[in-house]
Structure formats: C-alpha cells, structure tokens
Image (tube, coloured by chain):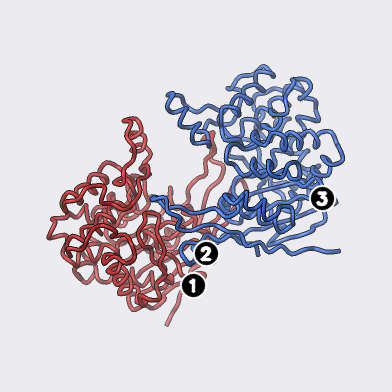
Chain colours: A blue, B red
C-alpha cells in the first residue's frame, strides 16, 4: 500500500492511503498500488481531456484562441491577474461576457491576488473561479457548433454530451458506465476506474508524442505555459516547468492527480482514499520518482511539495508530510 | 470499521477510517472500533485536562477567574469578541499583557469577526489564537506558583512538567511513555493510546459526577458556558448546549474528538486516521447516537454536523458527508 504520513515530533500523527495506477496507451497496467479498479471522480484532473474537443472541433482557429488561453482551458488556476485576463479574453473572442460563465465566484487561491482584490474593495467574480478557463472553453465549443450557450454546464446539453463521448473515447469506458455527478464549479464530473483514467492520460501522451492534432496542441500548451495551468507556487506549474516537456500533470479535487508521460506513452492516475490534497502532491512526486521519471535533484527542487514542512502559528517546524510509495510492477 | 463517507451524486467519492474507544472510569473498554491501541496526539482535545491543574492549584480563587474564563481555558475558540475579551481579562487579572502569550497570532475562525478586524484595519493578535485561553490558564498556573512566565510553553518548564504529570494521572500512562511533540500553538502536545485518552475523559466525567473539586469545576464551566469552549456555529458548543449537562466534548486538530459522559462515567476518544476534521464531527455524533446518548431528534438538531451537505460554488447541494459507525460492544 502506498501511504502518505503526516508526522509530528517523533511519531506519525495521521496517515493517508493512496491508490495508484500506471497504465500504457494499450490499456495495460504497468505498475499499481492499492485498488486500481477504484472508481474515482476525476474532477479537475480531466480538464486536459475536456479541452480536446475545443481543439478538435475548430475553436482555436475560429476564435484565434492562443496557446496561453488553451492552457487556461486545462487549468485549475489561482485567479492571478494573468488568469483572469486570459479567461476574459476567451469570452471576448467568442462574443460573451462574464455572466455567461456557469461557475460561481470564489476568492483567488493566490493569496496576494485575493488581498489585492479585497484592498481595492472588489468582490471576486466568476472569472476568478479556478475553473473559469475550462468554462470559457466549453462556451467556445458551444459557439463553434452554434449550440445555445445557456445551460452548457448541464448533463443534457450538447456540450456535456460531447464531453461524455470524449471521456468515453479516451478512457475506453462505455458512456453508460461512466458515473456522473455535479462538480464544484457546477458542470458534470465523471467517475471511472483509476486504470481507465490512467489509460486516458497514456493515450493523450501517446497522441502528443506521435503528433496527433488535439493531444499535441493541448499538451504543448500545458508544458509551454505551465503558469496558466496552475499558478505561482503551484505544483502542476512547477513540475511541468522542471520536467521541460517530459511530463504533463493535472490535479483534481478530493485527492486526485493525473499525469501523462509522452516519451514513455504512460499515464498515471492516483486517488487519495480520503480525498486529502496534502497527500496527493507528495504521492504524485513519489510515484514519478519511483518510475525514475524524476531524479533526486528534481525531487530536491520540488521539496516544498514532495516533503512539505508543517509549521505552527509561531512559524516553527513541528512536523512534515512524506510519501511512502510501494508500486508493484506488473510484468508480462 | 467505522468510516465516514463523502458522497457526490450517486457514488462515494472519498472515505475516512475512524478509530474509536469507549472506556469507563475503571479503564475498561466498553465499546470499540478499529485500532483502539493507536497512539494519537490528543492535541486540543485535552484542554479540559490541562485546565484541571489551574483549578487544583488555586488559580481561580487567587485571581478571581470566572466560569466563562475557565471555560475559555478549555477552548479552541473562534476568536469572537467575547473570547478575545475573556483571554485579555485573565491576563489582566494575573498582571500580564498579550505579549506574554507564546501562541502565534492567527485570524479568527469566526468569519464575521475576521472580516470586522480586517475592515477596522487591525491585524489578528495572539489573543485571537484559538488556544489563547489555554495559554492564559497556563500563565495563571505559573503565577500561582511564582514560576517564571517566560518559556512556559517549553517541555522543560515547570508548567509543562506539571501538565505531563496531570496527563499521566488521568490517562494512567506513565509520564515516560507519553509521546510529546510541539502543537500548533507552540506548547507541548501529548500522544497516548486512544483507550487511555478515553479513560482520562471517563475519569474526569466520573469526578464531575461525584463532585470532585477540579473535574466538577471544569465540566460545569464547559457545559454552562459552551459558547466559550467553541463559538458560534461550532459543534462543541452546539452539542453541549443540546446535551444540557449530559455530555462535555472537545475537538482536537488532526481528526481527534473526545467526550465525557458524567451520568454513565464513560469517556469517548476517536481519531480519524487521516486527520480530517470533516470526518471527526459526523463520527463523534454517530458514536454518541450508537451509544444512545443522543436521540434521533438530537441528531436532527445537529444535522449540520451529523450529515453536512457539500455545496458547490453555485450554492447547489452536490453531495454530503455521513458516518457509518460500527461499534463493537465489549461485554464482560
């Protein structure tokens, strides 16, 4: 079992269990830990896959959407000015305003941006929602097809029917077998086994490697503009910056993390059983290290996420978090 | 195994494992779930026990500390004006200022109080720290004995040596076998098996029932002034208000919850394995319901904590949290 331990003083205080699937583009499980058949809502981790139809159906060309804006479609962004501007820019290009977004407003995750907003006496808008790029992309998809934009977040709208089909294509799970629920931002979220989720990332990675149109565009946007996929001091951003094109990665709520490795045509999907984000980050890095996709030097550069310190209200280091990865290789 | 499930749509999204010990004043385990020998840092859950020496050693009389102020010594308070005033009042009575507190400042947990502070352009002080009452109590203890107040939070200071002895007395764990580490507020925190922690609460409950001086004073202060032990919309406060003297309860960080039942001379201690607070609250209420210490009507009145809803950024209910308690009765 792969676990993430939260220690304090000389003892482990809390322990997270993590399920991990490493799958190739053929759908073969190459390494595993825990219950790889676990059905997990992928949450924001599948935004890169939700961006594929935006590319495939011609929205980039029709609306002159930039690479940075495409990266934002794959993002759980921190609500920094560049993110808000990119989301607003997509909306301008498709002739819509902020009110077209179905996601609710929330304060920027980036504390200085949240503080600035507060000091200016401004309330957070829907553009600040970490999912505003994905929503803007979905609206662009509706515009390309001439579908109504109202209700684009609901499961019976053509946009979400298209998303479900896309998910089914990449995960190889029949659409009828995909669990659905409502995500934090109001759109449909999809539940599939971890192996299927990892397989989807492996296929996107493979597509990016072999130059398949939509996967290549999406992965290129993510790895070239990682600051649009997360933000300042965010793991997705720092990891992709460090990996320099070797890895694309996306976090999801409730302890989900996915990554694709184009060079090896592999996908990684993990779920912290209890949903803790604090465990998902060290777990992902531990898994990538186990797979020799990150070096010890890389890990040291990402120590803030690989082995974060726990500080108390006095600023003293009183504990920390560390992953204990036990991947079982699956040989032929 | 007792679990707390976080569901979304038709599926369970995340799952927390919970270890529970229900122990009587004689130290006998009366009901259990999971690993009751698990050593857990009790964190803030043992504040009621840390308040006992303050009473025993005469600080209430010497400094005219009120019941509300004693309740605050047992609190993880929300930093509301009444809490800040009570902490400041204890300090005034013992001739010290805010700077004597070792806990670091943090914004009040009570959102309107935090907002008010911000709007007034004021920074949070150490008095706003949820532990400021406990710290003020420890300083009162130092004053009673004429010990130096500087460094009262460190493990080699007479205050903390006294606390360790007190913990040992109530938990029946030899002082040398109690794990120690540094808590979020900078003082020593103590790790003991769940059974020992529950036993300590049972003994305090028993003491309160039979009129033993310090337990009776501490429990009376908590159940009479529960708004000083937590705050507005806090479970400790609401539960004690509803139970009307039948239960005293105290939450701790990292998924710990303890309760004492004077009438039955029982103690309950639980630890969410992964440290999630969101699971500790439904778990505690589920355990108390299982023990027939809360009625269905009580549970309905506490539904906000027993079965909280998950809302998305649009304010829609998209899921919820529910406990599945499996207590194994331990008969003679």
Residue drawn at the location 79% of the way across and 42% of the way down: A204
For label 3, count other residues whose C-alpha is less than 10 Å away and answer few (under 14), some (14-19) or many (20+).
some
Q: Chain of mark 1?
A: B
Q: Residue A181: image x %, image y %?
A: 64, 43
Q: Is residue B41 above or below residue A104?
A: below
- Packing grade of label 2 (10 A; few <14, some 14-19, many >=20) is many
Q: Do marks 2 and 1 share a subunit?
A: yes
Q: Percent x, y for residue B236?
A: 35, 54
Residue B328 badge: 1
Which numbered disc covers residue B207? none
- The answer to whether marks 3 and 1 sit on the same chain is no
Marks 3 and 2: which is nearer the front? 3
| Quadrant where the image shows the N terminus of chain B | bottom right
Residue placed under numbered mark 2 in the picture: B2
Pair 3/1: label in front: 3
Q: Residues within 10 Å of mark 1 (few under 14, many from 20)?
A: some
Identify the secondary structure beneath mark 3.
helix
């Amino acid at each position: 079992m792969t676990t993430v331990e939260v220690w304090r003083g000389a003892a482990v205080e809390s322990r997270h269990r993590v399920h991990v699937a490493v799958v190739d583009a053929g759908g073969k499980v190459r390494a595993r830990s825990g219950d790889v058949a676990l059905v997990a809502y992928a949450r924001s981790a599948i935004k890169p896959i939700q961006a594929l139809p935006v590319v495939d159906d011609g929205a980039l060309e029709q609306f002159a959407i930039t690479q940075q804006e495409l990266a934002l479609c794959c993002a759980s962004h921190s609500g920094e000015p560049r993110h808000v501007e990119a989301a607003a820019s997509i909306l301008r290009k498709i002739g819509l305003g902020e009110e077209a977004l179905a996601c609710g407003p929330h304060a920027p995750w980036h504390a200085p941006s949240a503080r600035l907003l507060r000091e200016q006496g401004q309330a957070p808008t829907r553009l600040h929602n970490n999912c505003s790029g994905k929503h803007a992309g979905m609206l662009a998809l509706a515009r390309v097809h001439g579908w109504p934009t109202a209700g684009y977040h609901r499961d019976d709208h053509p946009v979400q029917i298209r998303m479900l089909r896309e998910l089914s294509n990449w995960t190889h799970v029949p659409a009828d077998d995909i669990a659905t629920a409502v995500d934090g931002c109001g759109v449909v979220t999809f539940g599939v086994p971890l192996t299927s989720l990892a397989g989807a990332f492996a296929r996107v990675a493979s597509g990016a490697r072999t130059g398949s149109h939509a996967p290549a565009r999406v992965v290129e946007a993510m790895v070239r503009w990682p600051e649009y996929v997360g933000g300042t001091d965010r793991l997705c951003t720092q990891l992709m910056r460090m990996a320099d094109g070797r890895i694309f990665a996306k976090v999801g709520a409730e302890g989900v993390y996915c990554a694709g490795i184009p060079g090896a045509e592999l996908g990684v999907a993990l779920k912290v059983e209890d949903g803790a984000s604090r465990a998902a980050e060290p777990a992902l890095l531990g898994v990538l290290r186990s797979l020799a996709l990150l070096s010890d030097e890389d890990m040291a550069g990402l120590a803030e996420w690989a082995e974060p310190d726990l500080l108390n209200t006095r600023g003293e280091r009183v504990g920390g978090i560390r992953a204990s990865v036990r991947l079982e290789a699956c040989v032929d």
